[in-house]
Structures are given as structure tokens and as C-alpha cells.
Image (cartoon, rainbow, N blue to C red):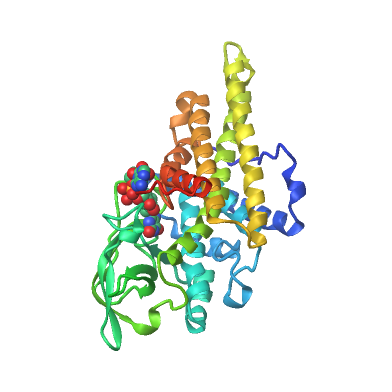
């Protein structure tokens, strides 16, 4: 793969909206990605393996629990810093960002918000340092966009719960030490349970043959009469709103992450357009190529503004789920389109692993599907503005 020469576009001087702390956090993450991710990511994506050696580095840049309080091992940062870390990691690879998102927003967040003090003390410091990795089991083979239909369930057996069912498409599942699992109780109400590797009847087979997020490990969670201790139930929130609260936090991170992938594709195509000569000129001198680049930077700039504003709203505790949906949907769509256009600008070279664009393009096919598909987020906006439910 080519050396990482990435320079971030900032067409509207958005850096002026950032604090010194934001810039420091971003710069640490950017340098780490250049040093630790860019040199190895192509090889790991090609062999479809998660590079486990980067876990401690992810912890060092604050990627595990950026906004979790320091008393639990988190970085205690604000929402914009969290977003900037996700942007920089996804600039390197969406699969690596997925690992960090799951750990922070789908595992640490529910333990912090819905767990007991004993659960926080037991799990959060280990998850923040990367000593333990976690995963989040919501999706099932027959229930993806409609998680409320889940059939995974647990029964109260007096001194423990008995868990049965299966989850599918679970990021980090093959190596996670703890899974936040969403399951229905005997009355049909959804709760979160902390299921640890090693519990009898709990297995995590890996999912193979992915053409997307190849450097992220994905698997199933299978529960065959798993005895879960009663103290492993997350007591402070139940119902579908509990997992959806985690998804808000993760989707917000994805909105930033997608900008990172788009920036990398744009920056690569811009540099290539000035170097690649055809018909005696750099291809960047042709109007058709300039149109592509001009539209890319316009879309990136709009997404940066939208997302910065969303971060400010989240810092004030004012962002709605529907606002987060809009940003996730817009930014991932923006990034996937930019990846496609940028890939074309590199001609044949664009399909090789010499450059990052094709990998981003394939990765974004998962990002546009998980944490609510492109269609589902549109329905959320539709419901929000009309008050009419088009889901069913
Ligand atoms: C690589 C990867 C990693 C993932 N990681 C995780 C994870 O860590 N944890 C987890 O729980 N899940 C995870 N997922 C699952 C992901 O969230 C689901 O794939 C996603 O929610 C879509 O569900 P589905 O695949 O079953 O598609 P379906 O729900 O079957 O949707 C199929 C199509 O139908 C459309 N559709 C569905 N309902 C409607 C409707 N009402 N109106 C109009 N159109 C509709 C959808 O938009 C989509 O286009 C992951 C997925 C992938 C690919």
C-alpha cells in the first residue's frame, strides 16, 4: 500500500469551532492511525482478520469510552472529541472504527447508564483499557430492522436466569469476553444481560465470507440453556428504548466516522488527480474530474457542519434520536457516493489495494446497513416530521 500522506480538508475553516482539547485529541488519533493502522490495514483486510495488536493503542487514544467518566477508566471527553476520534479511526478503516464504536457505545454505555455500581466497577475499567473486549447482541437471524420481534428469551429460575436464543451479525463476537445481550423476559419485556465467555452453553462462531468490514471480526452468539447470574441483569432500563438508547450514541459516532472515510477518499483522489497524466495533462485539469472533486468537497463540508452542530446539541443534552438518524443516513450516503466517484478517478489503480478507496467503498456497504439501514433512517425522519408511522 502507498505511504499514508493524508491531509484533512477543512474548506470552511471549521477548526475555528474546535477547542484546543478537540484538536489535541484529534491529532493524537490521526498520528496513531498513520503510524499503527495505515501500514497494516490492507494486509489484515485482505486476510479478513482483526489486528488484535492495535487494541492497546485504541485504548491509549481514548477510543474505548471517550465520554465515559474517568473514575471508570473512560477518557471523560465531550461529544465532539468522541466524534473526532471516530472520524480519525474510520479515516483509517471502518472496521477498526466499528470495534471501537461497539466497545464504547454499545457495551460501556449501557453498563454505565443502565448498570449497577458493582457492574460499572467490575467491567468499565477493563473495557476502557482493552483488557476485555465486548460485543452487543441485538440482531437475530429473523429480526434485523425489527428488533422488537426478537425471540431470544430468559426465564427466572430462582437463583439464576436461563437464557436461550441466537444473535447474528455481531461485531467483536468471536473474541469478546463479555456480551451485552438483549432478550425478553417471561412477560415479553426486553432487558439487557451481561453474558461472559466461558458460561456453559454460550458459543460465538465466526461469520466468514464477508466482502465488507473484512478487518472487523463478526460472529453469532448462541445461547443454549445458559445460566446467567441474577446480578448480570442491567436493572436501570428495560424495553426497546434501552438498546435504542445505545444505538443513538453509536449512530452519532458513525456520522463522524463516515466523514473520515469520505475525507480519505477525497484526499487520495485529489492527490492522484494532480499526479496522473493523460493526454499530456494532469487529469485534475479536466472539467469532468474537477466536477467530481468539487462536489466531493461540497458534500464533505456540509456533513462536517451538520455533524459539528449535532455534537454541540449532544453536549447540551438536546439532540433527538431523529436528528441523529438524519446525520447517520446523510453522512454514510455521502461517503459511499464519494468512495464510488473517487474510485473511478483512480481508473484501474482504484480497484487495487495500493490505495484505500476500494476498501472504504466495500466497508461502507456495511456501515449503510448496520445500526439502522438507509431506508429505516429515512422512515425515522418521515415519522418525525409527519407524526405518521410508515414502518408497518
Ligand atoms: C458487518 C455487520 C456488523 C454488524 N454488527 C452488529 C452488532 O454488533 N450487533 C447487532 O446487534 N447487529 C449488528 N449488525 C446487524 C445490523 O444492524 C442489521 O444487519 C441491520 O439492522 C439490518 O437488518 P437485516 O440485515 O436483518 O436486514 P432486514 O431488516 O431484513 O432489511 C432488509 C431490507 O428491507 C428494508 N426494510 C426492513 N424493514 C422495512 C420497512 N419497515 N420499510 C421499508 N423497508 C424496510 C431494509 O431497509 C433493508 O433494505 C451488523 C451487520 C453487519 C452487516
Residue found at x 53% / y 33%: 338
Is 66 above or below relative to 262?
Answer: below
Q: Residue furthest top?
A: 279
Image quadrant of residue 166?
bottom left
Q: Where is residue 135? Give x, y as percent.
A: 40, 64
Total labels drawn: 0
Is 310 above or below relative to 348?
Answer: below
> Is residue 28 something that shows in the picture?
no
Q: Where is residue 47? Give x, y as percent.
A: 36, 47
Residue found at x 54% / y 42%: 331
Image quadrant of residue 182?
bottom left
Q: Where is residue 118? Give x, y as percent.
A: 49, 84
**Residue closer to the observer: 91 or 271:** 91
Is 161 above or below relative to 148?
Answer: below
Q: Residue furthest bottom?
A: 159
Q: Viewed as shown, does residue 166 lie left or right of 288?
A: left
Image quadrant of residue 137?
bottom left
**Residue closer to the observer: 391 or 244:** 391
Residue found at x 57% / y 53%: 86
Q: Viewed as shown, does residue 271 lie left or right of 380?
A: right
> Is residue 365 something that shows in the picture?
yes
Q: Residue furthest left?
A: 224
**Residue closer to the observer: 56 or 143:** 143
Q: Where is residue 336? Give x, y as percent.
A: 48, 37
Amino acid at each position: 500500500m502507498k505511504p499514508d500522506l493524508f491531509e484533512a480538508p477543512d474548506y470552511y475553516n471549521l477548526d475555528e469551532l474546535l477547542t484546543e482539547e478537540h484538536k489535541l485529541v484529534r491529532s493524537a488519533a490521526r498520528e496513531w492511525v498513520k503510524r499503527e493502522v495505515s501500514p497494516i490495514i490492507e494486509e489484515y483486510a485482505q486476510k479478513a482478520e482483526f489486528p488484535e495488536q492495535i487494541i492497546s493503542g485504541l485504548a491509549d487514544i481514548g477510543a474505548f469510552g471517550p465520554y465515559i467518566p474517568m473514575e471508570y477508566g473512560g477518557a471523560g471527553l465531550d461529544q465532539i472529541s468522541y466524534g473526532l476520534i471516530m472520524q480519525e479511526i474510520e479515516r483509517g478503516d471502518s472496521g477498526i472504527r466499528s470495534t471501537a464504536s461497539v466497545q464504547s457505545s454499545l457495551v460501556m454505555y449501557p453498563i454505565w447508564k443502565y448498570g449497577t455500581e458493582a457492574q460499572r466497577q467490575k467491567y468499565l475499567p477493563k473495557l476502557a483499557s482493552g483488557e476485555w473486549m465486548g460485543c452487543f447482541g441485538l440482531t437475530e437471524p429473523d429480526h434485523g430492522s425489527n428488533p422488537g420481534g426478537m425471540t431470544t428469551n430468559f426465564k427466572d429460575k430462582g437463583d439464576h436466569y436461563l437464557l436461550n436464543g441466537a444473535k447474528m451479525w455481531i461485531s467483536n463476537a468471536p473474541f469478546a469476553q463479555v456480551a451485552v445481550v438483549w432478550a425478553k423476559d417471561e412477560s415479553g419485556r426486553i432487558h439487557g444481560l451481561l453474558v461472559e465467555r466461558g458460561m456453559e452453553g454460550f458459543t460465538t462462531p465466526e461469520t466468514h465470507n464477508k466482502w465488507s468490514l473484512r478487518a472487523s471480526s463478526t460472529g453469532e452468539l448462541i445461547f443454549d440453556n445458559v445460566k446467567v447470574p441474577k446480578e448480570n441483569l442491567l436493572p436501570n432500563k428495560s424495553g426497546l428504548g434501552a438498546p435504542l438508547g445505545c444505538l443513538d450514541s453509536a449512530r452519532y459516532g458513525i456520522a463522524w466516522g463516515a466523514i473520515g472515510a469520505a475525507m480519505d477518499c477525497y484526499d487520495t483522489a485529489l492527490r492522484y488527480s494532480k499526479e496522473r497524466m493523460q493526454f499530456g495533462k494532469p487529469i485534475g485539469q479536466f472539467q469532468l474530474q474537477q466536477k467530481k472533486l468539487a462536489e466531493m468537497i461540497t458534500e464533505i463540508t456540509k456533513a462536517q457542519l451538520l455533524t459539528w452542530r449535532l455534537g454541540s446539541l449532544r453536549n447540551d443534552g438536546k439532540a433527538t434520536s431523529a436528528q441523529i438518524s438524519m446525520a447517520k443516513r446523510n453522512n454514510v450516503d455521502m461517503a459511499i457516493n464519494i468512495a464510488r466517484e473517487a474510485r473511478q478517478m483512480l481508473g484501474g489503480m482504484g480497484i487495487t489495494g495500493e490505495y484505500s478507496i476500494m476498501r472504504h467503498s466495500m466497508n461502507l456497504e456495511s456501515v449503510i446497513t448496520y445500526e439502522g439501514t438507509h431506508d429505516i433512517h429515512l422512515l425515522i425522519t418521515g415519522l418525525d416530521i409527519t407524526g405518521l408511522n410508515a414502518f408497518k
